[in-house]
Amino acid sequence: MRTDHLAGSASVAGFEVPLEMLSACHGRVEAQCATLRRLLPHVVTYGADQDAQWAASRVMRYFDTAAKDHHADEEQDLFPALLESMAGSGAVDLHDIITTLTRQHREIETAWRQLRLSLARLENGDPLGLDANEVEAFIQLYERHIACEEEELLPMAKQLLNDEILDRIGRAMRRRRSIDNIDGLALRPGS
């Protein structure tokens, strides 16, 4: 059976363009959510077959690593940089957006912990481990979150953040992922 219908793909952007990389990550999150949606009818038809187990494993790996790093990229680097760029100039709307997005991160993480348990059962061969309502609730949380970031936060960031700040954010994103070679220069961890 073809397994490419269970896994999605999205475009790749590099650390030198951190806002585009964050947006590309949204595309990858959407692809993983699409995999989750396709997984539900697949499990009904085929049970916890090898394809379903493989897809569950890939979704878990993605949300355990890349999605977690994405939230850290925003909360530790992008959000503070945006607030700093607006210091003293009425950043109330921006502060409200960031507060909402941070709260949404916690809600997504809570929903993920529960959904991950179900996916782990599926990965281990339990076809009854995946609940359609749980999957859909998780996906809807992410869809609302991504819409807010794409429609409000990232356009604002493009206007407010200069190249120096964006470079700093990109370097932090690279370090977070333990990529020690920036522009061909070997770096010590933490440098």
Image: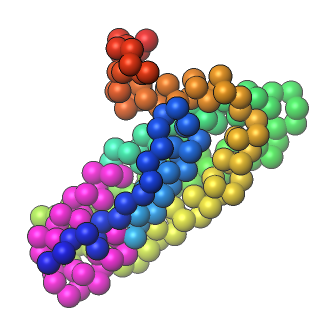
Q: Position of residue 47 (x, y in %)?
A: 16, 81
The residue at the point 65 percent across, 22 percent down is 164
Q: Position of residue 71 (x, y in %)?
A: 49, 43
Q: Which one is in front, 103 or 159? A: 159
Task: State the extent of the magenta-drawn residues as a range.
Answer: 35-63
Q: Is residue 105 left or right of residue 187?
A: right
> Which quadrant of the figure has residue 44?
bottom left
Q: Is residue 127 above or below residue 158?
A: below
Q: Is residue 10 left or right of residue 91?
A: left
Q: Position of residue 74 (x, y in %)?
A: 56, 39
Q: Is residue 122 above or below residue 71?
A: below
> Which quadrant of the figure has residue 158?
top right
Q: Is residue 47 magenta?
A: yes
The residue lying furthest to the front in this view is 184
| Secondary structure, magenta segment, majority class | helix
The residue lying furthest to the bottom in this view is 45
Q: Which one is in front, 181 or 88? A: 181
The residue at the point 88 percent across, 32 percent down is 89
Res. 118 visible in picture = no
Res. 137 visible in picture = yes
Quarter placement of the N terminus: bottom left
The residue at the point 42 percent across, 21 percent down is 182
